[in-house]
Image (cartoon, rainbow, N blue to C red):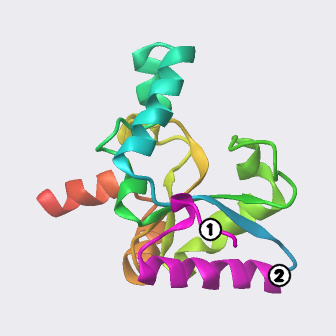
Amino acid sequence: KETLSENIYMRPEAAAALEALFAGAAEDGLTLYATSGYRSYSTQKAIFERKLERMTEEQANDSVAKPGYSEHQTGLAMDIEGETTKGTGLTEAFGESPEGIWAAEHCAEYGFVVRYPKGKETVTGISYEPWHFRYVGRELAAFLKKKGLTLEEYYQLLAL
């Protein structure tokens, strides 16, 4: 009997949107894979501690969220990879792959944003992650894409 690991879980609305995103990619001849969705506090803690073994705390903070601060703990985020980059690990190469280009271009149609886009590292506080998609709903995703905003920039607009 196969058991599902926690890392592919998402909230139902986000999971349905992700399935639709993957189906849209398939219609265009591309294959996407879910690699990391929901993470418990303990899983996030272990990931962060592994990073700390290989780099400084500042470097670790730039590349992975501290436990309790990860979007993966919300059930609204998914790390994805494509057929051409499968098995190479989550790297910036995904952003240049056919699947990564397609996903970035079409994700808003399904309610997702590339959460940590290139050139916005100082705004988000996180390194460029073309594989990290966050479900925000179609309306907000379309608005953010049209305006070229991150969630942080959107929240700043709301505060004005």
Q: Which residue is mark 2?
A: 28
Q: Which residue is mark 1?
A: 3
Q: Nearer the viewer, mark 2 or mark 1?
A: 1
The image quadrant where one finds the C terminus is bottom left
Task: Answer with left or right where residue 150 lies relative to residue 92.
Answer: left
Residue farthest toward the top in the current orientation of the protein: 56
Seen at 42% across and 42% down, the residue is 44
The image quadrant where one finds the N terminus is bottom right
Task: Answer with left or right where residue 138 lies relative to residue 86.
Answer: left
Q: Does 46 lie within the magenta span?
A: no
Seen at 72% across and 84% down, the residue is 23
Instruction: Pinpoint residue 50: horizontal percent, then vertical percent.
Output: 53, 26
* Mark 1 burial class by Cα count in 10 Å: few <14, some 14-19, many 20+: few
Q: Main secondary structure of the magenta part?
A: helix
Q: Three-letter amino acid code at disc 2?
A: Asp
Among the 4 quarters of the image, the one containing residue 135: bottom left
Q: Does 23 lie within the magenta span?
A: yes
Q: Three-letter amino acid code at disc 1?
A: Thr
Q: Does 94 sit above or below residue 22?
A: above
Residue farthest toward the left in the current orientation of the protein: 160
Task: Answer with left or right where residue 63 lies relative to residue 79.
Answer: left
Instruction: Pinpoint residue 25: horizontal percent, then vertical percent.
Output: 75, 78
Q: Does 37 sit above or below residue 109?
A: above
Seen at 57% across and 61% down, the residue is 5
Seen at 87% across and 56% down, the residue is 84
Q: Which residues are magenta?
A: 1-28
Mark 2: which secondary structure?
A: loop
Mark 1: which secondary structure?
A: loop
Q: For residue 133, say whether it is visible.
A: no
* Mark 2 burial class by Cα count in 10 Å: few <14, some 14-19, many 20+: few
Instruction: Pinpoint residue 48: horizontal percent, then vertical percent.
Output: 45, 31
